[in-house]
Each structure stands twice: as C-alpha cells, then as structure tokens.
Amino acid sequence: MAARLVITVTSADVGARITTRRRVPGGFRDAVGVLESWEHGVLRVRKKDGTIVEIPEESLVAARVVPAAPPRPGRS
C-alpha cells in the first residue's frame, strides 16, 4: 500500500509544530519544527537545533501539524 501524500498545513498554522516533505534535486527532504512564517510563497520552519529552513511552497509534497515532541528521558 502506497503512502498518501497530503498537505494540510495552512498559514493559519504559524506557531504550530509541523512536519514537511519537499522535492529537492535527486529526491526528497524532510523537516520537522515550528512554522515561524508563511509569506510570499515561502514557509520558514525552525528546527529543534534552532536553524531555519526556508521551503518554497511549490516544492511541498506533504505537510501536516504534529504534536509537541515528547520529553527526552533523563531531562526535567
């Protein structure tokens, strides 16, 4: 059974944690993080390491809101 690729993220989801899959030369790239902005056709996603990924919306093949990351063991 093939996976169904769907984009359910909108500009109303700014501030939410999302996962994305986008086309790049030679395949696909994934990014998970907080949607910082979606302006002029570009999504800006802040990953957990603090880096920002800029994703042109025309390259998106899948995106959705996901729950907050679970706490890591041994951290309070």
Image (cartoon, rainbow, N blue to C red):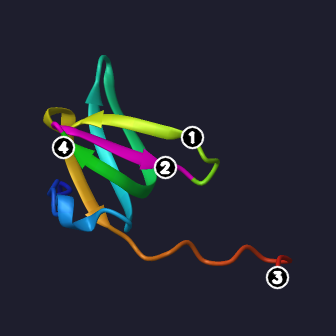
Q: Crowdedness of circle 2 by 10 Å Cα count: few (<14), some, many (20+)?
A: many
Identify which residue is drawn at 25% across, 55% down: 63
Residue 17 pos. (x, y %): 41, 65
Give the spatial CA distance, label 1 vs label 4.
Answer: 22 Å
- Magenta stretch bounds: 40-47
* Amino acid residing under circle 3: Ser
Distance between the alpha carbons at the discs numbered 4 and 2: 19 Å
Q: In which quadrant of the rendered view does residue 19 lie?
A: bottom left
Residue, disc 4: 61
Please, what is the dominant secondary structure of the magenta stretch? strand
Q: Which residue is mark 3?
A: 76
Q: Is residue 43 left or right of 4 when viewed as pictured?
A: right
Helix, strand or loop at disc 4? Answer: strand
Q: CA distance from mark 3 to mark 2?
A: 23 Å
Q: Which residue is mark 1?
A: 51
Which of disc 4 and disc 1 is earlier in sequence? 1
Closer to the observer: label 3 or label 2?
2
Q: Is residue 41 magenta?
A: yes
Q: Where does residue 49 sit, x and y in percent of width and height?
A: 64, 48
Answer with mark 2 or mark 1, whichever residue precedes in sequence: 2
The residue where tag 2 is placed is: 46
Tell me whether circle 2 and circle 1 mark residues in contact (CB < 8 Å): yes
Q: Mark 4 against mark 2, which lies toward the viewer? A: 2
Residue 4, located in which quarter of the rendered image? bottom left
Determine the secondary structure under disc 2.
strand
Q: Give above or below for 28 relative to 67.
A: above
